[in-house]
Image (cartoon, rainbow, N blue to C red):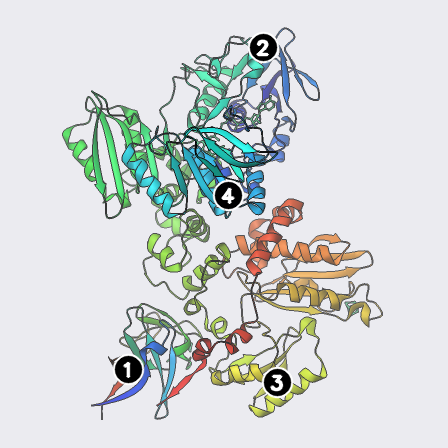
Amino acid sequence: MPKQKLLMIGNGMAGVRTIEEILDRDPEKYDITIIGDEPHPNYNRIMLSNILQNKMTPSEIILNDETWYASNNITLHTDEKAILIDRHTNTVTTTKRNISYDKLILATGSRAFILPIPGADLEGVLGFRTIADTEKMIETSKKYERATVIGGGLLGLEAARGLLDQGMDVTVIHLADWLMETQLDAKAGELLKADLEKQGMKFLMQKATAKIIGKSRVTGLAFKDGTQIETDLVVMAIGIKPEIELAQHANLPTGRGIVVDDFLNTADPDIFAVGECAEHNGIAYGLVAPLYEQGKVLADHLCGIENKGYRGSKMFTQLKVSGCDLFSAGDIKETADIKGVTIFNSIENKYKKIFMRDEKLVGVVLYGDTTEGNRLYNLLKKEEELTDFTLVSLLHKSGESENVSVAEMPDDESVCGCNGVTKGDITRAITDKGLTTIGEVTAHTKAGGSCGKCKPIIGDILEHTLGDDFVSAAPAGICGCTDLTRDQLIIQIRAKQLQTAKEVRHVLAFRNPEGCSKCRPALNYYLNMIWPQTHADEPESRYVNERLHANIQNDGTYSVIPRMYAGQTDPQQLIKIAKVAEKYNVPLLKLTGGQRIGLYGVKKEDLPKIWEELDMRSGFAYGKTLRTVKSCVGSKFCRFGTQDALALGEALERQFEFVDTPHKFKMGVSGCPRSCVESGVKDYGIICVENGYQIYIGGNGGTEVKEAQLLTTVATEQEVLDICSAFVQYYRETGVYMERTAPWLERMGMEHVREIILDPTEQAKLKDTLAEALAGRDDPWKQVLEDEEKQKLYHVERV
Amino acid sequence: MEKKYIADLENLTPLIGREIIMDGTTIALFRLTDDSVKAIENRCPHKNGPLAEGTVSGTNVFCPLHDYKISLETGVVAAPDEGCVKTYETVIENGKIYLVTAL
Ligand SMILES: Cc1cc2nc3c(=O)[nH]c(=O)nc-3n(C[C@H](O)[C@H](O)[C@H](O)COP(=O)(O)OP(=O)(O)OC[C@H]3O[C@@H](n4cnc5c(N)ncnc54)[C@H](O)[C@@H]3O)c2cc1C
Ligand code: SF4
Ligand code: FES
C-alpha cells in the first residue's frame, strides 16, 4: 500500500515539532512534504532576540538543518508560499506548483500586527517576527541612530534591548500605565522600567500613536495628544495576528485563529491546524509551550495512538533581557476572591507577589530573582490546596532562594517549561542513556532547546545525578575555583552581561574570589573576546610573558624577539641588533624556530631600553597570539616557486599581528608543494600551487604533532586572507583557553568548521567581528615606551 | 628593630609584584586587593623562579615558572609541592612602605 501523503503548510516551530513527534512515533507512516515561505530551514524564532542582542548568530539558531529533512525523507520547499487550498480535490496550490494531500496540517503561525494608521507602509517601519526582520533592524542600525519601538510588552522590550545593543538611541512607546501590563502588576512593571532606564532605554508612557510621519522613509511619529517625536526606525510590537487567510478562503471556520477541536482537527476531517494559527476553546496561544503540547496530541492522533485530547494550557512568561529577571504566571489581577501577598526587598530589588484563591496558588509575579519560578509554577499547575505551613514556606523561601536545590526538587517538577520536560524525564534520560552534558540532554529530551533559560538547572541536575561521575564524565569546571565549563561561562557572561572578571567570579559564585593562575588569564581572554571594545584588559591577570611582553627564561631573564615580517630583515636592522647585543652583553643571539632573530638572557630592567634602541616592533614570540608567519622565498627567487609566498606571508603577518587567540597560532606559506616551511604542521598553512593556494588548517608541531587538513583551494591572495579572518575568529569565539587548533578542530569537527568558514555570509560576519576586535590595537613595545606608568612594571628598586 | 623605607604604596599596582634589592637580597613586594602589603624572598624554593612576576590571588602567589603556589603570609608552599620562602614584615605609614628588620 502506498504511504499516505501528509502535507504541512508552514515550516516553523510548532509545525516542525509536530512532524518530529510523528517521526518519533511512526517514521514510516507518512510521505511528508513541507512548504515554507521563509528561505530558511526551521529555526528557533525565540532566539531572534538573542541575535539582535549580539548573543547568538543566525546559524546557531537553526533547529533542523537541511540534512535533517533529507535524512527523514521529508520533501522541503522553502521560499514558497501556499496560496490556495482546494478541499474538493485535496490539493494545495503554491507559488510554484500543485501538491495533493491525504492529510493537511496548517502551521502558518502568525504575523506581526501592524497598526492600521497612516504611514504604516513607509520604509523603516517593521515588525519583529523573522530572520529577515532582524537582519533589517541590524542593517538599519548601521546607517541610522534613532529607533522607536511601539509596544512595551515582551517582544517590544526585547527588540528595544537589542536595538540598544546595536548602538541605537531607543524609545519605547507604551499605551498602558506600566510595562508588560498583562503579565506584571504595577509594582513589578515600575521596577522593570527603572532597570531598563538604567540600561539607557527611554520611555513614553500612556501614549497612543496616531500617525507615522515621512515621505518615503519614516522620519517621525505623531501621537493622539498632539505631540511628536523624530525617529529613523519604527518597530511595531503591539501584538500578533494569526495567519488564517488560507483557511478563510477554504471556508473553514475561523475566529481569531483557525478553529480546532481537542484533536486539532478543523471542520474538515482531513485538515488540522497547530501552533499560533490555531484557536482552541477560544484561545490562540502565543508561546511555544502550549504549541508543543498541541503537537504531541496531533502526532498521537495522526499515528492512531489513543490520546485524551488537548485541554488547553497554563502559561508562564520570562523576559530575555539581561539584568531584568522576571517571571510571571497565571492570574495576576486582584479581585474580590483573588488576594495577593507581596514581599519586597528594596535593597536587592527583589520583588515577589503571589496570588491566592480559595487556598490555592493561582498567580505569581517575580522580579529580580526568578529562581523560584519553576517551583511556584508547578504548585500553580497542580492546583493543590496549600496548608498554612506551605503558605509560610512559600513566602519565606524568598531571599534564601538562591540555592534552590535540585536534590529537593520533586520528580514531576517542570524544568523546561517551553518543552514540558520534568526533572524526572531528565534524570531518566541521564541514567538510561548515559548522558553527561547539557547538549546531550537537550538532544535527547529537548529540554533547554527553546528559550534556553533552564540550562543552568539542567547542569545542576546532571551534576546531582551523576555525582562523582559528573566530574570525570562531563567537561569539568575550568579550574578549581568553579564547576562551570568554558561554554557555561561564556553563555553566562553573555546572558548576564558580565563586564569584568571580578563580576564573573562574584555573580557565578567562584569558590575563590580572586581566582587562580588558571582561571585569571582565561577569564581575561574570554572577556576580551566577548567585549572587544569595552573590556579593560587586566595586566595583573596576564601571565608574566604577556604582561611584560617578553618571554621569561629559566633564570628569570627574558628574551627579545623583534618582528621580521615573513622572516625578512635588512642591513640597518641587523646593524642595530648587533649594536644592542654588544652594548647590553646579550649572552645569546640565535635564530628561532620561526625564522626570527632572538636576543636571549636580557634583564627585565633593560627591556624597554633595548626596545627603544632596536626601534622594531614586538614579534609576539611570548603570547597566545599569532607568533610568526614562516615563509619561503617562493617565486621571487626559487626556481620551483609558483606564487609570491613572501608577499603573502608578509600580508598575513601584517593583518593578524595583534590578534589574541586561545593559544599560540602559527602560520606558514610555502611557494610550492615541496613545502620548505612545513606548512603541513601549521595552524594555518598555505601551499602555493600553479592555479592558486591550498589552505591547510589545524596542524600543530608541538607536544603532539598533528598534520594539518586541507580546507580548500582558492584562486586569490584576498581569499586566503578572508578565510584566515573567518578561521581565526571562529577559533577565538569557540576555542577553550589554552586549546590549540588541532584539538579544537577535532572537537568541533572538520566538516562543521568548513561549513561555517566557507559560507559566504558567515565568513563575512566573522571577518567583520574580527576587524572590529582588532581596531585600534597597536605595538605593545611602543605603548610601553610612550607610557611612564607602564614602564614602572620593569623597575627594580634598590634600597 | 629597624625600619627601612622601600617604596610608596601609590607606586605599586595591586596584584602586580615589584622587585626590591636590599643589601644584595632580592625581595618581592606585593600590594593586595585590600591595600595591605606583603613582602617575601624573591626566589621560588623550586628552581629560583622570580616570585615578583607571579600571579597573585588572595594571599597567595603562583610562581611564574612552574606554578608553585606560595603563601604570602607564611611563605609556605601549598601541597602537594613542598618548600618555604622567607617572609618580611612591613608597615605602611603615610603611604610609605617600610620593611621591618631585626637588627
Ligand atoms: C522575537 C521573538 C521572541 C519570542 N520569544 C519567545 C519566548 O521567549 N518564549 C516563547 O515561548 N515564545 C516566544 N516567541 C514566540 C514563538 O516564537 C512562537 O510562539 C512560535 O514560533 C510559533 O510557532 P508556529 O509554528 O506556530 O509559527 P512560526 O514559528 O511563525 O511558523 C510559521 C511559519 O509558517 C510560514 N507561513 C505562513 N503562511 C505561509 C504560507 N501561506 N505558505 C508557506 N509558509 C507560510 C511562516 O513564514 C513561518 O515560517 C517569540 C517570538 C519572537 C518573534
Ligand atoms: S616551498 Fe617550493 S617554492 Fe618554496 S622554497 Fe621550497 S621549493 Fe622553493
Ligand atoms: S621555580 Fe617556582 S615553580 Fe618552579
Q: Answer few, some or many: residues within 10 Å of disc 4's Cα (few below 14, many 20 plus, some between 14 and 19).
A: many
Residue type, mark 1 in image: Lys
Q: Answer few, some or many: residues within 10 Å of disc 3's Cα (few below 14, many 20 plus, some between 14 and 19).
A: some
Q: Chain of mark 2?
A: A
Q: Which residue lies at the image location 51% right of the left edge and 42% below the top edge?
A: A51
The earlier-in-sequence mark between 3 and 4 is: 4
Which residue matches tag 2?
A250
Q: Residue furthest top?
A: A88
Give the alpha-carbon distance from disc 4 to disc 2, as whole Å: 43 Å
Q: Which mark is residue A146?
A: 4
Which residue matches tag 1?
B96
Dots 4, 2 in contact, CB < 8 A: no
Give the alpha-carbon distance from disc 3 to disc 2, as whole Å: 85 Å
Residue type, mark 2 in image: Ala
Residue type, mark 4 in image: Arg
Instruction: Give residue A387's quadrant in the image.
Output: top left
Which residue matches tag 3?
A589
